[in-house]
Amino acid sequence: MTVPETRGPGLGPRAPRHGARGEQAPVVAVVALGGAVGATVRYAASLTWPVPAGAFPWTTMGVNIAGCALIGVLMVAVTELRAPHRLVRPFLGTGVLGGFTTFSTYAVDIQRLLDTGRGTTALAYLAATPVAAVLAVWCAVTVSRRALERRRS
């Protein structure tokens, strides 16, 4: 027997309830655990490669580019390689890589550069980071797909 479709006032069809809280608890747990792992690795990177005040924030940019590239690899792996366990994508994608990449620090870095009178550097960083991040995803997806095709043939 299926649950009849119900409508909320002006909201369109509602999804049937199947104990959503119980089903989401493992997802929330693995996202939190993965986020702690990713943020710890990002913090370690900032300690390993500190950036002086007013200098170009290479560490944050590098972390964001590396994280975006890893997201590209992960997406190919989970969509084209094989069907992983349902918690792999939330743990690695949202958790680890979401905690590792840091676009909030990117925004703070831009503000700090502006506050120290480095407007040109701030604008260069503002433009370069998202362009490099998107290129990193694209390159990682392209390379991962080619590697997967070679492996299959």
Image (cartoon, grey):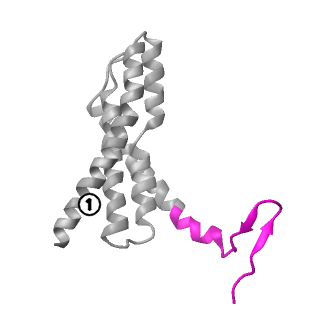
Q: In the picture shown, does residue 65 fall above or below 119?
A: below
Q: Residue at x 78, y 73 (%)?
A: 6
For this view, does 109 lie left or right of residue 25? left
For this view, does 102 lie left or right of residue 44? right
Q: Quadrant of the C terminus?
A: bottom left
Q: As rendered, which of 57 and 128 lies closer to the eye?
A: 128
The image position of residue 87, as x and y in percent, is 44, 67
Marks counted in the figure total: 1
Residue 3 within the segment the image draws in magenta: yes
Q: Which residues are magenta?
A: 1-27
Q: Quadrant of residue 48?
A: top left
Q: Residue at x 37, y 35 (%)?
A: 131
Q: As rendered, which of 8 and 51 lies closer to the eye?
A: 8
The image position of residue 59, as x and y in percent, is 31, 31
Q: As rendered, which of 108 and 133 lies closer to the eye?
A: 133
Q: In the picture shown, does residue 86 fall above or below 53?
A: below
The image position of residue 138, as x and y in percent, is 32, 48
Residue 121 within the segment the image draws in magenta: no
Residue 104 seen in the figure: yes
Which residue in the structure is indicated by mark 1?
A: 145
The secondary structure type at the circle numbered 1 is helix
Query: What is the crowding at mark 1: few (fewer than 14 residues within 10 Å), some, or many (at least 20)?
Result: some
Q: Quadrant of residue 134?
A: top left
The image position of residue 4, as x and y in percent, is 75, 80
Name of the residue lying farthest toward the top: 117
Q: Residue at x 34, y 58 (%)?
A: 74
Q: Amino acid at mark 1?
A: Arg
Q: Quadrant of residue 121?
A: top left
Name of the residue lying farthest toward the bottom: 1
Q: In the picture shown, does residue 153 fall above or below 97?
A: below
